[in-house]
Amino acid sequence: MANIELVNDDDATGTLRAFYDAAISRAGRVYNIVRTMSPNPAVLEASMRLYMQVMKGPSGLTRRERELIATVTSRTNDCYY
């Protein structure tokens, strides 16, 4: 089985610290989807840029519709974040 060494909140520095702080500010915690990318902050940054564009960028869909699509897709794929 694969094992990913995750960076704990107290050990995050630099760019990763900024992402963790933003996550805590937004949601009160660092969700595992963010923590899973913690060993490679450049990947985390690219993923967050994509997420922000998809979920909050210009679109013919409302934010609610985008969230519902994400929820249904996660449920369909048995993804429980």
Image (cartoon, rainbow, N blue to C red):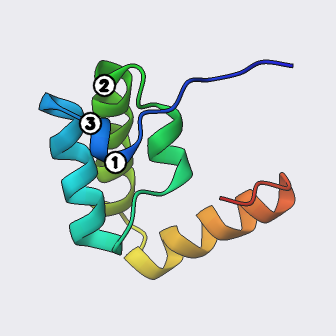
Residues at marks 3 and 2, CA–CA distance in whole angstroms: 10 Å
Residue at point 20% right, 57% down? 22
Q: x, y percentage for residue 75?
A: 80, 64
Within 10 Å of disc 1 (Cα), the crowding (few <14, some 14-19, many 20+) is some
Q: Which residue is mark 3?
A: 12
Q: x, y percentage for residue 39?
A: 42, 22
Residue at point 29% right, 20% down? 42
In the image, what residue type sits under mark 2? Answer: Pro
Residue 25 relative to residue 65: left or right: left
The image quadrant that residue 63 belongs to is bottom left
Label annotation for residue 41: 2
Whether tag 3 and tag 2 are in contact, CB under 8 A, the answer is no
Which element type, helix, strand or loop, lies under badge 3? Answer: loop
Residue 43 relative to residue 2: left or right: left
Query: Nearer the viewer's eye, disc 3 or disc 2?
Result: 3
Q: Is residue 14 visible?
A: yes
The image quadrant that residue 19 belongs to is top left
The mark nearer the N terminus, 1 or 2, is: 1
Which element type, helix, strand or loop, lies under badge 1? Answer: helix
Image quarter where the C terminus lies is bottom right
Within 10 Å of disc 3 (Cα), the crowding (few <14, some 14-19, many 20+) is some
Depth check: give the residue in front, 57 or 35.
35
Residue at point 50% right, 68% down? 66
In the image, what residue type sits under mark 3? Answer: Ala
The mark nearer the N terminus, 3 or 2, is: 3
Whether tag 3 and tag 1 are in contact, CB under 8 A, the answer is yes
Question: In this view, which residue lies farthest toward the bottom?
Answer: 64
Q: Which residue is mark 1?
A: 9
Residues at marks 3 and 1, CA–CA distance in whole angstroms: 6 Å
Residue at point 29% right, 48% down? 53
